[in-house]
Image (tube, rainbow, N blue to C red):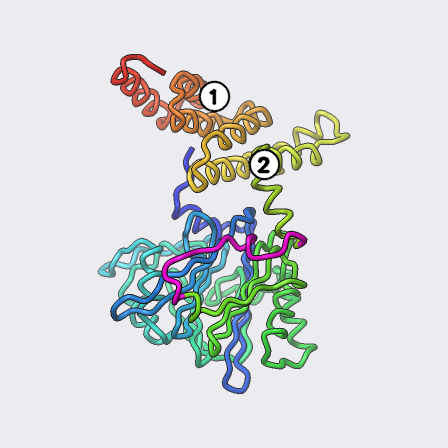
Amino acid sequence: MKIRLLTIFLLVLGHTAYCCSMFKMTHKGKTIVGNNEDWVSPNAEIWFEPKMQNSYGVAYVGFINRFPQGAMNEAGLVFDGFATPEMPVAKQAGKIEMPVKEIVRQVMSHFHTVHQVKDYLSAIDMSFLTSSVMMFVDKTGEYLLVEGGALTLGKQEYYIQSNFNPTKSTVEEDRKKLDYYMKGISFLASNQPTGTAAFCSSVMDQMHVKDTQYTNIYDLNKGTIQLFLHHDFGHSVEINLKDELKKGAHSYMMAELFPESAEGVAFYKKYNNPNDPAGYIRELWTKGTAGKSRDEIEKYRSASGLAWLSNYIGYEWMRDKKQVNGAIKIFTFATEMYPGDANLFDSLGEAYWVAKDYNAAILNYGKSLSLNPKNLNAIDMLVKIKQAMEKEGGKN
């Protein structure tokens, strides 16, 4: 079943299985911000939107669904977001409702200080941030923390934000539960900050986890972005925002900016193997089940999260990479791992629908419905497929 864009944003920002850390430092009037982006996919991109009339040019970072997970504009304003535990937020009556992607783009293309951002967001209903926090930093070193029910300005010289709600009453306890956050705090306590990009990257290195796909070091005064790939702090690429914006609208897959020998490039290629799209998932399954008893395999099956991961990767291939045959192979293997998962059969049915293999789509939507008779999407799709077949004269 399809994963919506907002769901992906909230998963990256709000799925507690994944973390993210941001460190800002202002040293002798110079502000540098570091960020670790932690996610399952290495399909990370950086893309550039040149300035238009009365707007700033912006560099965005994120994944191939082009949902901005972070950004810096040419005025030196930086943004990123973080997953947090679920916290109910009431609707904010009388405020403007707007898609989160549009909110980010409006802010990054029109503002240069966090005070401006706060004034703008004060009129927006931010109650959708039930499991995430956004952070903005400007050249002065001031920052704005955005929660569903709070907008908080700060100006500490050295500040780390991670997967916690800063205004929650249990914030101190929540921080202590995050090992990677505490490593960053400990590093700051035992090392004299130098105000350099190298120091900032050292802090981010302390806080990386196994799923850190990329790290950005934003120099707000110089207008540069230093990229590290897949928690490999031995290789980096520096992006000059001004120079890139002169090239017009364009993008780079981050892995393609690094040498073939880089660890992150190897992972990127394995994950995106065109000759064996399901190979990455198959390798995880093989390693996780090798030598295990039937009961142990069942425990691994239920606890590994491979059903969700297969579904996510399958949609990446089908929706973002536009390679539906690869998606079919991924979903097919996923249904072999999880023969009782109605959602995976629904996804396989959709892939066959996109490929216009209507008979196979009917078969898999039917299987999904047999496993979950309440799957209304499968019912709707079976009707839709029948109509399409009738329109095409019964041809498959």
In magenta segment, residue 267:
no
Picture quadrant where residue 102 is located: bottom left
In what element is the residue under mark 2?
helix
Looking at this view, name the residue that lies furthest to the front: 247
| Mark carried by residue 306 | 2
Residue 8 as seen in the image, left or right of residue 176: left
Rendered position, 361 above or below 40: above
Tell me the kind of residue under disc 1. Leu
Looking at this view, name the residue that lies furthest to the bottom: 28
| Residue at 39% across, 72% down | 74
Q: Are marks 1 and 2 in contact (CB under 8 Å)?
A: no
Q: Give x and y (percent) for residue 249.
A: 37, 59
Disc 1/disc 2 C-alpha distance (Å): 19 Å
In what element is the residue under mark 1?
helix
Residue 111 as seen in the image, left or right of residue 240: left
Rendered position, 130 above or below 120: above
Tell me the kind of residue under disc 2. Leu
Picture quadrant where residue 280 is located: top right
Rendered position, 54 above or below 250: below
* Quarter of the image with the N terminus in it: top left
Looking at this view, name the residue that lies furthest to the left: 94
Residue indicated by mark 1: 371
* Quarter of the image with the C terminus in it: top left
State the extent of the magenta-drawn residues as a range.
245-261
Picture quadrant where residue 175 is located: bottom right
Q: Nearer the viewer, residue 171 or 380?
A: 380
Q: Give x and y (percent) for residue 273.
A: 58, 38
Crowd class of label 1 (few under 14; some 14 to 19; many from 20; radius 10 Å): some
